[in-house]
Image (spheres, rainbow, N blue to C red):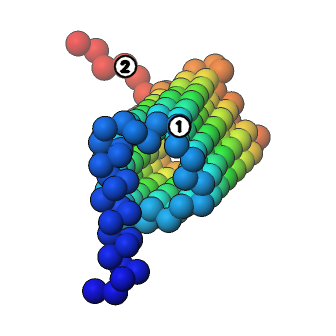
Amino acid sequence: MKEEHIKELQWRLLLKQAAEIGALGGAKLSGADLSHANLSTADLCGIKLRGASLAGAFLRGTNLNSADLSGANLKGADLREADFLGANLSRAVLSGASLNGADLSQADLSHAWVGDANLTDADLTGADLIGADLTDANLSGANLTDADLSDADLSGANLSGVRFDDQTKWPKGFDAPVPEPELQQ
């Protein structure tokens, strides 16, 4: 094994161990290459990962509250059930990512590229999605209450069963989905 590869493996192991004990909260790892890293269920609250590469990373159930992931590459990452409450994901690349059941409430996803991502049952309450590219994204069952989708591209997006309210802002000229009737018991 090349020395370079061994050092990378050691770095990833150290990072995983630090994340497991919560030692990364608030850490500054801007620009880091954490592609394919396994940080599932880690506490990364407040971490700074501006412009970092987390392409294909495993972050299922990870706490990323108030994290700064602006401009980060999360293409194809497993972010199911991750907690992004108040996180900054502006201009981030989330194409093809799995965000099923993720909490993105109050998150900044302005101008993010979220095309082909799976956001089934994601909570986007109060999220800023201004100018986001959601082309072909699956938003079925997502909560868009009070979300701002002004200037977002929703071409081909699956909006079946989405929840929204009068405060939800849709792109200009976009026909908001018709609310599905409540099931009678």
- Disc 1 packing (10 Å; few <14; some 14–19; many ≥20): some
Above or below 105: residue 92: below
Q: Residues within 10 Å of mark 2 (few under 14, many from 20)?
A: few
Question: Is 155 in front, or is 151?
Answer: 151
Q: Position of residue 141 (x, y in %)?
A: 40, 35
In terms of depth relative to the viewer, which is nearer, 22 or 168? 22
Q: Give the residue type at disc 1.
A: Gly
Q: Which residue in the protein does label 2 denote? A: 182
Marks 1/2: CA–CA distance: 43 Å
Image height of 131 relative to 73, above or below: above
Residue 38 drawn at (x, y percent): 31, 56
Left or right of residue 124, residue 14 in this image: left
The dot on residue 26 is: 1
Residue visible at 46% across and 36% down in the picture: 25
Percent from the top left, x then y, of residue 54?
47, 60
Would you say residue 88 is visible in this rendering? yes
Q: Is residue 183 left or right of residue 25?
A: left
